[in-house]
Amino acid sequence: MRARGDGRAWMLAALLGGLSAAAWLALAAAGASPWARYFAHDGWGTSGALAALCRAVPEGRVVVPAALHALAWVLMIAAMMLPTVYPLLALFRRVVAGRADGPRLIATAGAGYFAAWLAFGIAAHAADALLRSAAVRVPALAAWDWAIAAAVLAAAGAFQWTALKYRCLEACRSPFAFVAAHWHGVAPAREAWRLGLDHGLFCVGCCWALMLLMFVVGTGNLAWMLALAAVMAAEKNLRWGRRLRTPLGVALVVGAAAVVAAHV
């Protein structure tokens, strides 16, 4: 029986790992395709970031580009965040082991987690679009794209030392307490959804500032995606993850200062 359970645990790990790997490959393929410009805007920290603001998009056709940006965000979340949710789903799998609807409940919890990140992505892209639209209407703002980059870096660095960051991080690092608080088996589908959704909200709460860095370096930058994914996975899943608080915060603040120094 134990071997069977271990086998299923490996199946879940392999499934999440495979989905994450597939998302990475899809992002790499999209970045190398003729449609790469639809999947990611340049970052606020790059020279002339606003010059090519969606100029390749035909007039009046906003639905398809918006859908492609949403797809890119979904792939990015799958690539970066699926490995970090494994501890929660692995524990939940053991709790619902033996139930006929166990696999469906695990998938429902995963969907709830994903929904939280998707909602954040929509809000982040909307804010980015508003800034870019404002820059088109006020050309002088385009010359200050470096200031936006510095502000995001500084905010992400400062957030590393906030109580909210570590309240959310501790919740992400305690899957047992999370499952115990959310799963009672009374309304299985609803409880599984809330388990994943609430865990995703806490995950957004501890990682949102780091994810916004993708809008600084460019949302299609695979190297930065890999680096940030590794940092967030270490913070949430490794024993020494909390120790990244100070070095990461200092590095981001120093990066913000460097951007300012290069432009003043």
Image (cartoon, helix red, strand yellow):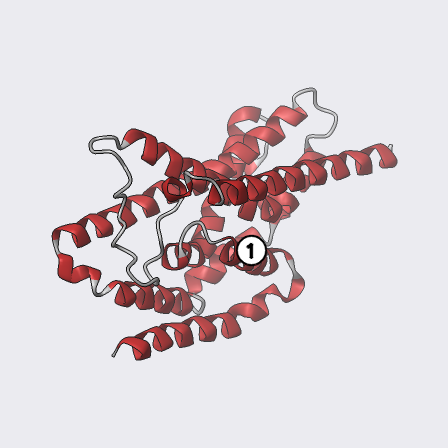
The vertical placement of 129 against 241, above or below, is: above
Question: For this view, does 235 lie left or right of residue 255?
Answer: right
Q: Which residue occupies 42% across, 55% down? A: 214
* Mark 1, secondary structure of its residue: helix
- Residue nearer the viewer, 133 or 82: 133
Q: Position of residue 4 (x, y in %)?
A: 84, 32
Q: Quadrant of residue 78?
A: top right
The extreme top residue here reads: 100
Give left or right: position of 150 versus 90.
left
Question: What residue type is disc 1 on?
Answer: Leu
Q: Is residue 106 above or below residue 25?
A: above
Q: Can residue 156 be seen at all in this image of the molecule? A: yes
Which residue appears at 69% of the width and 20% of the height? 100
Label 1 environment density (alpha carbons within 10 Å; few <14, some 14–19, many ≥20): few
For label 1, the residue is: 226
Q: Quadrant of the N terminus?
A: top right
Position of residue 26 measured from the top left corner of the image (x, y, whole percent): 54, 39
Image location of residue 155, percent across then percent down:
35, 66
Location of the C terminus by quadrant is: bottom left
Residue 187 seen: no
> Farthest residue in the front direction?
34
Residue 248 image position (x, y, % from top left): 50, 70
Most foreground residue, 138 or 242: 138
Q: Between residues 194 and 38, which one lies in front from this camera angle?
A: 38
